[in-house]
Amino acid sequence: MTGINRVALAKAVEALQGMAYEHRLHILILLRAGEATPTELAEAVPAHSTAVSHHLRHLIHAGLVRRRREGRQVFYSLPDEATGRLVDDVLRYAAE
């Protein structure tokens, strides 16, 4: 394979590393259904809220999650449909 786009390759590696933990992938699956607060995510994963915050920071850094503040409340969501398709594709791959 020639002409590999190094920037795209680095972005792909960062995304795969970002979702390569059970709790992080679970968070992405939950966010596939819509935005959620850290408390909602901690209850659903289940994990301590500190652990969820740690995972969310990694997911944001990897570009897999975005954060929105409304007053004192913080909401997390997937940044775009492409990220949702990536989550779907990973789950489809695992099911085969």
Image (cartoon, rainbow, N blue to C red):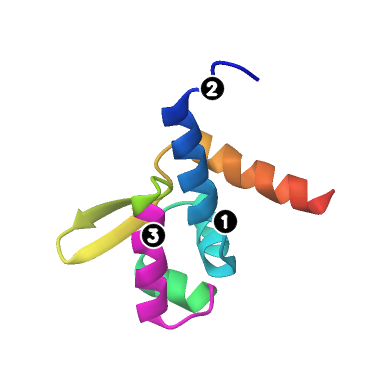
CA–CA distance in space, label 2 to label 1: 30 Å
**Mark positioned earlier in the residue sequence (3 or 2):** 2
Q: Is residue 66 left or right of residue 16?
A: left
Between 2 and 34, the one nearer to me in the picture: 2
Residue at 36%, 70% (x, y): give it: 54
Q: Residue drawn at (57%, 56%), measured in percent from left and top?
A: 29
**Measured from the top left, where is residue 71 in percent x and y?**
14, 61
Residue at image position (51%, 34%) is: 82
**Residue 49, above or below 41:** below
Image disc number at residue 4: 2
The percent coordinates of residue 38 (x first, y second) are 36, 69
Q: Which mark is residue 1?
A: none
C-alpha separation, residue under disc 3 versus residue under disc 1: 15 Å
Q: Is residue 11 above or below residue 41?
A: above
Mark 3 or 2, which is nearer the eye? 2
Q: What secondary structure do most residues of the magenta stretch adopt?
A: helix
Instruction: Report the amino acid beneath label 1.
Output: Ile
Instruction: Classify residue 94 as left or right of residue 34.
Output: right
Magenta stretch?
45-60
Q: Position of residue 44 (x, y in %)?
A: 53, 73
Residue 72 seen anywhere in this rendered image of the structure: yes
Q: Which secondary structure lies at badge 2?
A: loop
Report the Cα–Cα distance between label 3 and label 2: 26 Å
Q: Which residue is mark 3?
A: 58
**Residue found at the far top of this picture:** 3
Up-down: is 58 above or below 1? below
Magenta region includes residue 1:
no
The residue where tag 1 is placed is: 29
